[in-house]
Image (cartoon, rainbow, N blue to C red):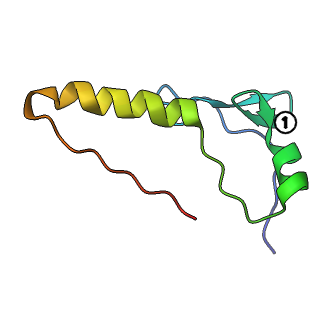
Amino acid sequence: MAQVTTSQPKPKTHRPMHDFHYVGDELYCEGVKILDIVRKGGTPVYIYSYKTIAEHLEKIRKAFQSVEPLICYSMKA
C-alpha cells in the first residue's frame, strides 16, 4: 500500500517555478490559492504563472539578442 504524506517539500536553491509558494499548508500562484482554482474549475488543471513565463521569456530574449530569434511557446490546452 502506498504511503501518502502531506509534508511540504524542502525549499531548494534553484526554483524554476518561483511564483508558486506555500502559505502555511496552502499552495499559491501569484497570490491566488490553488485550491480556489481547483474548486472553481475542477481537475485536472494546468496552472501557469504569467509572471514566471514573462520573466523567463525576457531572459531568453537577452541571451539571444545578437541573433534576433523568433521565440515561440506552446501551452497545454
Q: Which amino acid does label 1 sit on?
A: Glu
Position of residue 75 relative to residue 59, above or below, is below
Seen in the image, is 50 located left or right of residue 55? right
Could you say whether the residue bearing mark 1 is in a helix, strand or loop? strand
Position of residue 40 relative to residue 49, above or below, is below
Q: Where is residue 5 in the image (x, y as percent from the top left)?
A: 81, 52
Closest to the observer, 77 or 1: 77
Closest to the observer, 26 or 70: 70
Residue 59 position by quadrant: top left
Residue closest to the far left? 67
Position of residue 30 relative to residue 46, above or below, is above
Q: Residues within 10 Å of mark 1 (few under 14, many from 20)?
A: few
Q: Can residue 6 be seen in this view?
A: no
Residue 32 position by quadrant: top right
Name the image quarter holding the C terminus: bottom right
Q: Where is residue 38 in the image (x, y as percent from the top left)?
A: 84, 53
Residue under label 1 = 26
Name the image quarter holding the N terminus: bottom right
Q: Where is residue 66 in the image (x, y as percent from the top left)?
A: 9, 27
Residue closest to the far bottom? 1
